[in-house]
Amino acid sequence: MDGVLSQEEINALLNNDGTSGSGDELLTDAEKDAIGEIANISMGTAATTLFSLVNRRVEISTPVVSFSSWDDIVNDYERPCVFIKIGYTQGLNGSNILVLKEKDVKVITDLMMGGDGTNISGEIGELHLSAISEAMNQMMGSSATSLSSMLNRTIDISPPIAEVVDLKNTLDEGEIDSFLANEFVKISFRMEIGDLVDSEIMQLYPPDFVKDMCKGVTENMELDSQNVKEEAAATNTAAAAPQQPVDNNMNNQNAMNQNMMNQNMANPNMVNPNMMNSNMMGQNNMGQSVNVQPAQFTPFGAMPNQAYQPENIDLIMDVPLEVTVELGRTKKSISEILDFGPGKIIELNKLAGEPVDVLVNGKFVAKGEVVVIEESFGVRITEIINATKAIN
C-alpha cells in the first residue's frame, strides 16, 4: 500500500537515525574486556569498604558486560528499585548509575545502624536513601582511588544522589540521567552480604564515558610498558660498559716493589734502606722491655645503703613509637614481582573479615578490625596480645 513503510524499512530507519546503534558498535571487544577489568577492580575495592560499614562478609562476583536499554531494565529488573547517581568532578567527565533492589537497601541500612539486617518492614524512606547515599559515597570514593591509579590521574566524585524508581515503561525527559534514553553499557554483579543478601546489582554507563576510561587505562599501561623497556635498556647498557681502568698509583707501587726485589736478588750485598728501616724497627720492638701485669678490679662489696628509687615511666611518655597495621602477607617469586603493574591483585594470607595485626615498632601487640572514620581508615582494637603469645 502506498505511503506505508514495511517492517524492514522501519528497522533500517531506526538503526541509521544517529541516536543509537547496535550493541556491537557501542564498544569494541578490547574495550569490553578493559571495562570489565576496571569494574572488577573498582567494585572489589568498594566491597572491602562496604564490609567495614556493615561488619558482614561481602562478596561480589566477576562482572558481566552487556548492552541494554531502558525497556530491558523495565522488563528484567525488580520494581521498585533504588538508583544511585555518581557524578565525576575531576579526572573524568560524566556519570554512572548504580542500581540496587529495594530490599538490599533496607538490609544495608539496618546493618549500618547496628541492627542484624532483618528490620526491613515498611516502605523505603529518607533515612534509607540517606544511609545508602553515604555508603555509596564511601564505596565509590575508594573505587575512585583505585581508578586513579589505573588512569594515573586524580579522580574525584560528587556526593551520590539516591532515589526510588518505579521503572515505568516510559522514561520522562531528563529523569535520572539523559543517557538512559539511548542504548547504554550495563555491568552486572552478583552481590552477597553474609546470608542476608544474594542478588544482582547493576552499573549503567554511557558508551562515551566507558570509551574515555578505557582509552585512559590503555594509554597508561602503554606508558608503563615503555618505561619498563627504557629501564631495561639502560640496565643492559650499564652492564655492557667497559670496566674502569686500574688505579695508576697501584700499578706504579707494584712496579717499584718488583724493581727493588730484582735489585736485591742481583746485588745481595746492597742494603735496601726500606728493608733496613723495617728491620731496625723490629729489633727495637724486640729489645724493649714491656711491663705486663694483671688487671686490677674493685672487689664486689656491700653497696651503700640507698633508698630504692622506683622507675619513673613519665620520663619516656613522650617517646614516639611507630604503629603499623598489617593487613596480611604473602610470598612471591622475582618473576611474579616483576609482573606487577596497575590493577594487579595480590592475594594475602588472610581471609576477608579476619582481624588485622597491630604492631608497635615492629612488635606484635594487638589484633583489631578495620573501620572507616569519615574519609579515613582506622582500626578498632579487639584483642591485646600478651608477651608470651606475641613471642610464639
Image (tube, rainbow, N blue to C red):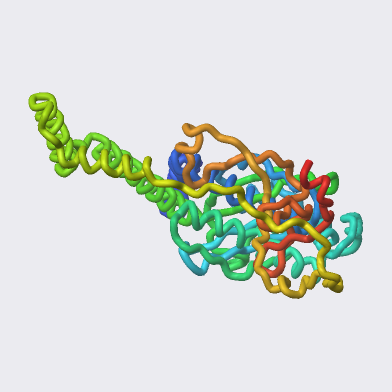
Residue ID at (50%, 57%): 148
- 9 left or right, relative to 316: left
The number of callouts visible is 0
Q: Residue at x 47, y 44 (%)?
A: 341
From where the camera sits, is residue 160 visible? Answer: yes
Residue drawn at 66 percent across, 53 percent down? 362
Q: Looking at the picture, does residue 227 appear above or below residue 275?
A: below
Q: Is 193 above or below relative to 298? A: above
Residue 8 or 351: which is nearer the viewer?
A: 351
Q: Is residue 346 left or right of residue 104?
A: left
Q: Position of residue 106 (x, y in %)?
A: 82, 59
Q: Quadrant of residue 225?
A: top left
Counting from the top left corner in percent of width and height, residue 92 is at: 47, 62
Image position, residue 293 (x, y; %):
57, 48
* Quadrant of the image occupied by residue 172: bottom right
Residue 100 visible, this angle: no
Horizontal relation, residue 237 to residue 22: left or right: left
Instruction: Name the residue at 78% across, 71% down.
Output: 313
Location of residue 328 by image quarter: top right
Q: Please identify the residue farthest to the top as the structure is shown.
A: 265
x and y percentages locating residue 178 in the rendered image: 54, 63
Of residues 59 and 223, the one nearer the viewer is: 223
Residue nearest the observer in this picture, 252 or 185: 252
Q: Quick one: quadrant of the C terminus? A: top right
From the viewer's side, name the closer residue of 389 and 33.
389
- In the figure, 189 relative to 46: above or below? above
